[in-house]
Image: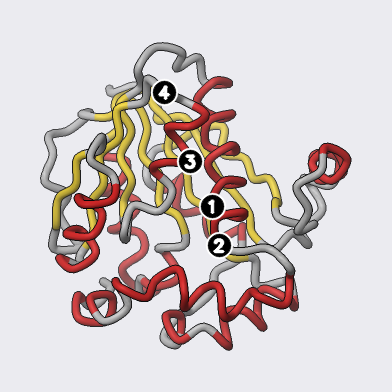
C-alpha cells in the first residue's frame, strides 16, 4: 500500500506540485478536479442516488475534490480517508463540512455496506499491483448492495498523461494501469455492469469542449478514465 511518509511530505505542496506538472495545459489542478467532481455527481444521479448519498473518498489527500462535489451536490454526505495524517489535518481545516479519518491503507475503518458509493481518484497507481485486488475488495466491502464503486485513473495510453506523471514528484513511484485492469479489479470485487468512459481530452471550460468530450468518451485517448459499476446484491 502507499507509504504514509511519502504523502505526508507532499501534503502542504499538493496543488503546487500538480500545477507545476500541468502548467503547459493552460489549466490548473482545480479545473481538472471540478471536471472529476461533475463526472462523479453525474454517476450518482444516473444510479438514482438523489437524496443525500453517503459517499466515501478513499485516498482523499487534502480533500481537494470535496468543495467541488458540494458545489454540484449540496446534500452529499462526504467521508474521506487517507494514509497521510498530514493530509488529513489539512483536509479537516479546509473542508469542515466533511469527515476525515486516517487509515492504515489496508482495512477501512467502517462496517460492511456503510456507504451508498465509494470512489478512489488516482490512488491505484500508487498501490503495488500485487495489492490492488485487496484494495478494491475493501472498497467493495464498505459499499451497500446495489451501491456504486468508482475508480478514476490516469490513462497510460495518453502521451500527455505520461509526461505529467513523469514530471510530477508526487508520482515518482507510480505504476500506471490501463482501463482493462480497472474493469477486472472492480468485477473481481463484486461489481456488475462495469463501464469505462475516457475524460479530460480538452483543457477548456467551454460548453462546446464538454460536448466534444461526451462524444469521444469511448475513445481511449483521454488524459484520464473513469470506471464504475454497481455492487451485486448480497447472497
The numbered dot on residue 33 is 1
Q: Quadrant of residue 126?
A: bottom left
Which of marks 2 and 4 precedes in the sequence?
Answer: 2
For label 4, the SS is loop
230 to the left or right of 58: right
Instruction: Give the alpha-carbon distance from disc 3 to disc 2, as whole Å.
Output: 12 Å
| Colour pattern | secondary structure
Give yes or no for contact between labels 2 and 1 (Cβ–Cβ under 8 Å). Answer: yes
For label 2, the SS is helix
The numbered dot on residue 155 is none
Q: In which quarter of the image is residue 66?
A: top left
Q: The C terminus lies in which quarter of the figure? A: top left
The answer to whether 47 is drawn above or below residue 176 in the figure is above
The answer to whether 73 is drawn above or below residue 199 in the figure is above
Instruction: Read off the residue under disc 3.
Output: 68
Whole-percent x and y of residue 48?
50, 14
Instruction: Give the alpha-carbon distance from disc 4 to disc 2, as whole Å.
Output: 22 Å
Instruction: Read off the residue under disc 2.
Output: 29
32 to the left or right of 67: right
Give yes or no for contact between labels 1 and 3 (Cβ–Cβ under 8 Å). Answer: yes
Which of marks 2 and 3 precedes in the sequence?
Answer: 2
For label 3, the SS is helix
Instruction: Give the alpha-carbon distance from disc 1 to disc 3, as whole Å.
Output: 7 Å
The numbered dot on residue 74 is 4
Whole-percent x and y of residue 78?
30, 35
For image coordinates 45% across by 55% down, the residue present is 121
The answer to whether 75 is drawn above or below residue 27 in the figure is above
Whole-percent x and y of residue 201?
78, 57
Amino acid at each position: 500500500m502507499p507509504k504514509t511518509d511519502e504523502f505526508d511530505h507532499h501534503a502542504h505542496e499538493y496543488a503546487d506540485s500538480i500545477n507545476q506538472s500541468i502548467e503547459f495545459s493552460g489549466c490548473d489542478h482545480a479545473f481538472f478536479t471540478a471536471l472529476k467532481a461533475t463526472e462523479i455527481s453525474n454517476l450518482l444521479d444516473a444510479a438514482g442516488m438523489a437524496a443525500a448519498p453517503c459517499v466515501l473518498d478513499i485516498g482523499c489527500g487534502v480533500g481537494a475534490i470535496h468543495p467541488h462535489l458540494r458545489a454540484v451536490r449540496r446534500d452529499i454526505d462526504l467521508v474521506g480517508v487517507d494514509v497521510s495524517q498530514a493530509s488529513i489535518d489539512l483536509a479537516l481545516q479546509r473542508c469542515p463540512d466533511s469527515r476525515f479519518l486516517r487509515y492504515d491503507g489496508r482495512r477501512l475503518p467502517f462496517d460492511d455496506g456503510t456507504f451508498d458509493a465509494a470512489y478512489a481518484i488516482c490512488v491505484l497507481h500508487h498501490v503495488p499491483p500485487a495489492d490492488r485486488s485487496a484494495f478494491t475488495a475493501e472498497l467493495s466491502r464498505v459499499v451497500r448492495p446495489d451501491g456504486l464503486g468508482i475508480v478514476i485513473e490516469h490513462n497510460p495510453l495518453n502521451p500527455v498523461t505520461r509526461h505529467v506523471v513523469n514530471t510530477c514528484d508526487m508520482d515518482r513511484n507510480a505504476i500506471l494501469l490501463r482501463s482493462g485492469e480497472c474493469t477486472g479489479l472492480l468485477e473481481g470485487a463484486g461489481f456488475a455492469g462495469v463501464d469505462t468512459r475516457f475524460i479530460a481530452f480538452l483543457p477548456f471550460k467551454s460548453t462546446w469542449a464538454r460536448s466534444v468530450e461526451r462524444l469521444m468518451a469511448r475513445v481511449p485517448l483521454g488524459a484520464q478514465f473513469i470506471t464504475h459499476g454497481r455492487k451485486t446484491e448480497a447472497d
